[in-house]
Image (spheres, helix red, strand yellow):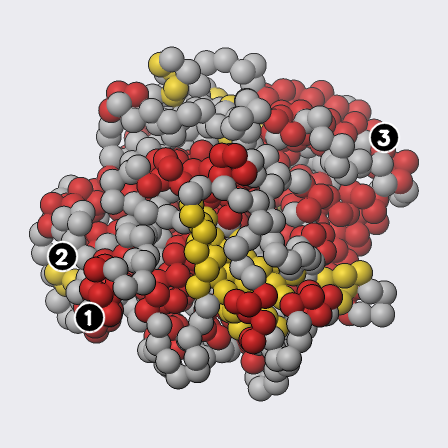
Amino acid sequence: MALLGGIAGALFQDRGSSKIVYKGAVLVRKTNVLDVTNVGASVVDNTADLLGLGVTLQLISAKTGKKSDPANLEKWLFSGGLFATDDVKYSVKFSVDPDFGLPGAFIIANSHPSEFYLVSLTVEMPGGGKIVEFPCYSWVYNSNLYRTERLFFSNQLYLPNETPTGLTNARESDLKALQGDGTGIRQDWDRIYDYDTYNDLGNPLLNLQRPTLGGSTDLPYPRRCRTGRININGVETLTLTPLNKFYIPSDERFGAVKNSDFLADGLKALSHSVLPTLESIITFDQTFDSFKEIKDLYDQGFDISELVTSPVRGMQTPLEFFNEFTADTGNTSYMKYPLPQILKVNEKGWMTDEEFARQMLCGVNPMMIHCLKEFPPMSTLDPEKYGPSKSAITEEHIGSQLEGSTVQQAVSDKKLFILSYHDEFMPYLDKINSQRSSYAYASRVLLFLKSDGTLRPVAIELSTPSSQRVFVPPAAGKTDWLWELAKAHAATNDSGYHQLVSHWLRTHACIEPFIIATNRQLSKLHPLNPFLQPHFKYTMSINSQARQSLINAAGIIELTFTPGKYSMEMSAVVYKGWRFDEQGLPADLIKRGMAVPDSTAKHGLKLAIEDYPYAADGLEIWDALEKWTSSYLDACYNDDEAVANDTELQAWWNEVIKKGHADKKDEPWWIKLDSKKNLALALTTIIWVASAHHAAVNFGQYAYAGYMPNHPTATHKPIPAENSDEHKKLLAKPEEFFLETVSRKLEAILVMLTLEILSSHASDEEYLGQRHISNWTDNPKAIAAFENFTAAMKNVEGIVARRNADPSLKNRLGPVSIPYTLLSPASEKGITGKGVPNSISI
């Protein structure tokens, strides 16, 4: 593989000819050194050029649609060779008619036996005139069967009705090529975007059946990208090779920087190579003996000398993989985990009730706490099947903990809050608890907002269809291990919901249909295509990896989270209640009762809890996104009528609804794109979900859940009845009993490895306010608007830092002294606990 950089062009008259010649230079960049196949490909590439089977380009006139004569890349063989380490230059010349005018597109044909990555083409008009730039940033494949061609457009963007005559056919044909015809098995070189259900999570060849998600009222789901793989009884089959690659359109693949695809391949390595070996040295039922044994994973390390298995990509063994992702021990046979932030300052802080409650405002899942609207809480489930609708929590349980208020006063004053997974878990408890060694409850946690602005948990209710049990905190200074077990069960439910819904469903899965529709219906010439593309970067690639390693049958999620094989099915049930118009931050806060509209308040919202770090910082980003989006639309659309009459825009939105989220196509709440205001809201919501929402639920995972007792992913035992034999065992050896209840050793180690990867930023990450493609548009108003947005993101960083330094905002650090930086826009690579990437890239 080779990387083509920029092609800079100058123009002159060809003597003795009526043609004008565009003279240019091509830049080639070397690719990932770990890809050992590059060397052989380079040799073949050079041989092909000697035979005249290289790369050719043709310009297309924006005015007439005329094409230039085919132009070959020149001096490929003599410009750096196999061992070039820097960018390498090549030359190209175009011959065009004198009336050719501005080029608006070009065709590039690849006859090489391998692909290359084309970054851009730049053409300078005669006499030092206008420069036309073509940002490409795309793989150009060869099918190995025939010469392949690609079409690229300049950065002069047009609404459909403004398209120059010479580009009309090219615009239409490029979209048609991206849409395909819905048939056939997709190949590596294809760029076809189409839809399919999640019928590929099981593996019938291994007797791992899972229901299809999407296409039914019982299990609705967003659509994924269609691959056309072999289908057995409605289920797509997977090959058994560990590094099997699912099809995704070539432009969605990871780039040539090592770090991005290494992170993603790490997930596959865990699932296909490391896990089987872990299972051979750690039995499924093996538990930790003490909290100290867990702490030793960071202090001393875990013996991985037996984990020498098959190679992973260019690495010799998974030991090299572990060395990339774990702290240096000085001994490559030991894996030493980085110390999670939650243990760095106060090792015991995670056990406090204050920290348990604080994490609902600024932990890994800060978007599920609700302001309590009625007491006692009520269920919407059928009481004949699932037990009493009314919560068993009474005023007697919590009345003494409300700083002198009555329960009804606290509800009226918006001082009571709830974290409830009652209705989500209850219908699945019998199935979950019939699995090997699993035991779960449906949970409710009630919290009281104290006068100092912090939350106190006042009751936890754990229920099954046949039982309800309420736990209350012990007196100050006392430890009640029944209460600690109740907190662990509640935290485990939060872990499952966080990973399956707040993280996977609401970001990864729900954004993919927007990516597919954008590429199918919004031309590369459309102003909204380059506007949205940074927020879609690598998402389809990481989603395809997840379907191989994380959310598939017997994948990491099923093996380590309490819902087990019902995990994805449960997320489909939750999707029944998903609404696009509630995914933006302000709408979500209002829905949960965590904010009310207030024209006098900052951002037009008054928070129910003033010191709510996720909401406070998130509103700063939302406001900046909204202003940037509105300013960009002002640079593209003259008025609301232009929005309503934009045929590609309307086709895009119609396809998102009718195909991408087809199980929601008849819902009345979809936003109508009939004005700039509504379009700005829709676009801001999409960008928010892909950037800030995902960052908030993803990049703090290792900080909080990298220490398993704080955020377990599985529970294996019920809470013992008071004075029972099991209760006596708990009182005799509370630490041991606690660790027998929560995630076991194999589960915890696998989750810790996974979260370390998921919490890491790649070296080539692109954050809000940044664009690696500088020539994405030639619209000066759009460029000025983006510069303002970049400045706004810098301002948000300062706001976050000042808030974290304010001692009156007690929820910003808490007992564990972790400053809330997850929505501070920029970051360095690695596990930093901060940074808001443009897209869902891990």
Q: Position of residue 403 (x, y in %)?
A: 61, 80
Viewer-proximal residue, 18 or 690? Answer: 690
Task: Look at mark 2 in the image and give the residue it sits on.
Answer: 304
Disc 1, SS? helix
Q: Is residue 223 above or below residue 703?
A: above
Q: CA distance from mark 3 to mark 2?
A: 62 Å
Q: Which residue is depicted at the point 38% across and 21% down? A: 236
Could you say which disc has been placed on residue 645 in the image? 3
Which corner quadrant of the image does residue 823 belong to? Answer: bottom right
Disc 2, SS? loop
| Residue type highlighted by circle 1 | Ala
Task: Look at mark 1 in the image and give the residue it sits on.
Answer: 732
Q: Which residue is depicted at the point 25% across and 45% down? A: 437
Q: Is residue 399 above or below residue 705?
A: below
Q: Position of residue 178 (x, y in %)?
A: 58, 24
Which is more foreground, mark 3 or mark 2?
2
